Image (tube, helix red, strand yellow):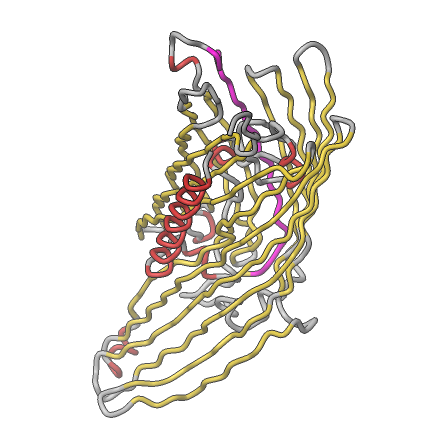
């Protein structure tokens, strides 16, 4: 590929990402009541390829897809190849709590990553993807007739927006054709705003509004390894593991509270707390993951992953701005940090990648699923998420015969929470769209 085409490709992808990030900053990048705690709803990391495999990828190695779940996997490639992956996702959620119902839908980027070789058996990748998203809005009215008789109608409302993004750079190298190791640096940044408002119908009473704005950043490291063992013939078993370090959060938390009425607006409280890496500051929990992948030639593969992270000491439930509601009442529920665990599985089948007659035999079909225990509890109850994933990659054949370019379409069906104990049941239908590009950029010309 020429330098002009390369420059145009990078410029186009950068413009797409900036426009998506800007639109996400102006609207909800996620919408769920469960994002009102800590740093919000954690994003399922990985590309559309990973998401359609149930979110697996710790042990996955594929020459034609960029796997960003494990930095050791970046070395799985043809020596001179460059891989680019870009994805978007659209969420549709349906909520129910007792007799109340609601719905929301959002749109955001999924990932943008570029990978290129740095040596015969080593490669590097850089990219960006969402880390978490905060988006919720609700209101309710006081129904106590004794209170309404004295003050008139009172309405309470809450609003939350924002999220964190993760920019990363990693490299991996393979030794003895079987053992691969990798390391990655993650820079997490973003803004989260939460506000709560009390409004009186009668002008003789002042309303009140309070909230927090969190401007956060942090750096952590991620390490991974993979070991690929040929079994017999064209079969191969790969073991993988990853470890992500905890992330001390820096930045600032701005808290405010003021009253407003027909006569004047009074500031009751305003304070900016600077997060400078103190041991008492909140942090994002570390995570350990293990996986096993079985692949048979270019025909099919299956993978199972397990991840675990402990948020109980993260101070999310005791730091203003992160804690959500501190006390459970008749109209408020409280969150508390806990340990998060997930098990994921995925299966991919490609009838005949080299078929020259039937196009759909060259497509890759995937199905997967996962079960996750969220990193928080609601009123002392665990919050669990279960989902099924489906996907297909439609290959794009080039005139020069190179494979690996394709469009991936995916769908996710699942549920979080339940109706037990006055919890919120969240059912969702999510769609993902991804584009992966494979090219050879480092061939030396034979003729001038």
Asked whether, in this view, residue 174 is left or right of residue 114, the answer is: right
Is 306 drawn above or below residue 220 in the view shown?
above
Residue 276 locus on image (x, y percent)? 63, 74
Is 298 drawn above or below residue 327 in the view shown?
above
Between 278 and 405, the one nearer to me in the picture: 405
Magenta stretch prevailing secondary structure: strand
Does the magenta run of residues contain 48? no
Q: Residue drawn 46% across and 21% down?
A: 364
Between 54 and 171, the one nearer to me in the picture: 171
Is 259 drawn above or below residue 353 in the view shown?
below
Q: Residue drawn 49% across and 26% down?
A: 404
Q: Residue drawn 33% across and 68% down?
A: 157
**Direction right: furthest residue:** 176
Does the magenta run of residues contain 344? yes
**Direction bottom: furthest residue:** 263
The span shown in magenta is 336-354
Residue 292 locus on image (x, y percent)? 67, 29
Residue 191 locus on image (x, y percent)? 46, 65
Residue 329 locus on image (x, y percent)? 46, 68
């Amino acid at each position: 590929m020429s330098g002009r085409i390369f420059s145009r490709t990078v410029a186009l992808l950068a413009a797409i990402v900036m426009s998506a990030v800007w639109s996400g900053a102006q609207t909800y990048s996620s919408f769920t009541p469960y994002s009102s705690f800590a740093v919000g709803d954690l994003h399922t990391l990985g590309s559309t390829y990973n998401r359609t495999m149930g979110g697996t990828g710790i042990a996955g190695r594929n020459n034609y897809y960029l796997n960003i779940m494990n930095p050791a996997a970046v070395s799985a490639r043809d020596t001179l190849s460059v891989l680019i992956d870009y994805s978007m996702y659209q969420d549709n959620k349906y909520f129910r709590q007792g007799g109340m119902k609601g719905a929301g839908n959002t749109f955001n980027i999924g990932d943008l990553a570029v990978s290129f070789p740095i040596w015969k058996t080593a490669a590097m990748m850089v990219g960006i993807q969402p880390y978490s998203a905060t988006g919720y809005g609700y209101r309710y009215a006081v129904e106590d007739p004794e209170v309404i008789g004295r003050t008139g109608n009172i309405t309470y409302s809450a609003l939350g927006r924002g999220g964190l993004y993760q920019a990363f750079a990693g490299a991996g190298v393979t030794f003895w054709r079987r053992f691969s190791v990798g390391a990655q640096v993650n820079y997490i940044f973003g803004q989260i705003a939460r506000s709560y408002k009390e409004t009186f119908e009668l002008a003789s009473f002042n309303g009140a509004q309070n909230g927090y704005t969190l401007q956060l950043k942090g750096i952590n490291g991620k390490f991974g390894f993979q070991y690929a063992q040929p079994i017999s013939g064209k079969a191969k078993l790969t073991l993988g593991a990853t470890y992500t370090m905890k992330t001390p959060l820096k930045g600032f938390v701005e808290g405010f509270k003021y009253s407003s009425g027909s006569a004047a607006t009074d500031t009751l409280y305003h304070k900016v707390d600077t997060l400078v890496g103190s041991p008492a500051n909140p942090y994002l929990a570390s995570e350990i993951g293990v996986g096993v992948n079985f692949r048979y030639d270019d025909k099919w593969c299956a993978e199972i992953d397990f991840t675990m992270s402990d948020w109980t000491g993260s101070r999310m439930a005791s730091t203003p701005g992160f804690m959500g509601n501190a006390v459970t009442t008749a109209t408020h529920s409280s969150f508390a940090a806990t340990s998060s665990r997930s098990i994921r599985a995925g299966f991919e089948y490609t009838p005949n990648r080299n078929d020259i007659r039937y196009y759909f035999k060259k497509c890759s079909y995937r199905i997967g699923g996962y079960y996750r225990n969220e990193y928080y509890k609601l009123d002392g109850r665990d919050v669990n998420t279960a989902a099924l994933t489906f996907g297909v990659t439609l290959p794009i054949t080039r005139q020069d015969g190179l494979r690996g370019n394709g469009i991936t379409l995916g769908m996710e069906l699942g549920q979080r929470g339940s109706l037990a104990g006055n919890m919120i049941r969240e059912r969702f239908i999510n769609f993902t769209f991804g584009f992966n590009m494979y090219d050879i950029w480092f061939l030396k010309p034979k003729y001038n």
